[in-house]
Image (spheres, rainbow, N blue to C red):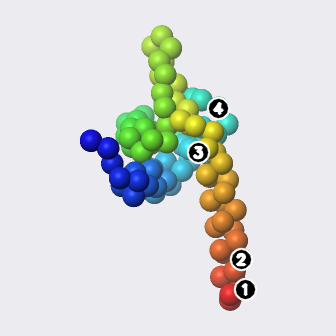
Amino acid sequence: MFKSLQEYKVQFLQGFGDKTRLKIIMALMEEEKTVSELVKELGCSQANISNHLKTLRDSGILKSRQEGKFVFYSLKDESVCEFVKYLDKMLLNLRKKALEGT
């Protein structure tokens, strides 16, 4: 059964709702990585990273591919990078307006 667009939006945005998941997304904007590489880069446990990767996959943000015994994770689409960049720009603009009192 297909989810409504609204349900899909909620699930997608939940992927961004955690600091560690945001760090994973930012790390994968550079290049695809394995769990081990993300563990080393982010300083989290393998179990923690794996749980967040599952959430990100379920949210439609990440994809994975297996090569031998390694699983490589990457952003599902370039539009995820564009979304993150737009979000940064939007939040900076909102913050600026809040500081200016408008």
Crowd rating for badge 2 (residues with CA inside 10 Å; few <14, some 14–19, many 20+): few
The picture quadrant where one finds residue 102 is bottom right
The single residue placed furthest to the left in the displayed view is: 1
**Which residue is labeled 4 in the image?**
31
The single residue placed furthest to the top in the displayed view is: 68
Do we see residue 8 in this rendering? yes
36 vs 48: above or below: above
Q: Amino acid at mark 1?
A: Glu
The numbered mark, 4 or 2, whose residue comes first in the sequence reads 4
Q: Nearer the viewer, residue 62 or 6?
A: 6
Crowd rating for badge 1 (residues with CA inside 10 Å; few <14, some 14–19, many 20+): few
Crowd rating for badge 3 (residues with CA inside 10 Å; few <14, some 14–19, many 20+): some
Distance of label 4 from label 2 (alpha carbons): 31 Å
**Which residue is labeled 2 in the image?**
96
Residue at horizontal 59 percent and vertical 45 percent from the top: 80
Q: Amino acid at mark 3?
A: Val
Q: In the structure shown, which secondary structural element does the residue marked by tag 4 occupy?
A: loop
The numbered mark, 4 or 3, whose residue comes first in the sequence reads 4
Q: Amino acid at mark 4?
A: Glu
The image position of residue 65, as x and y in percent, is: 49, 22
**Which residue is labeled 1 in the image?**
100
Decide if residue 36 is on the left or right side of residue 82: left
Crowd rating for badge 4 (residues with CA inside 10 Å; few <14, some 14–19, many 20+): few
Residue 80, numbered circle: 3
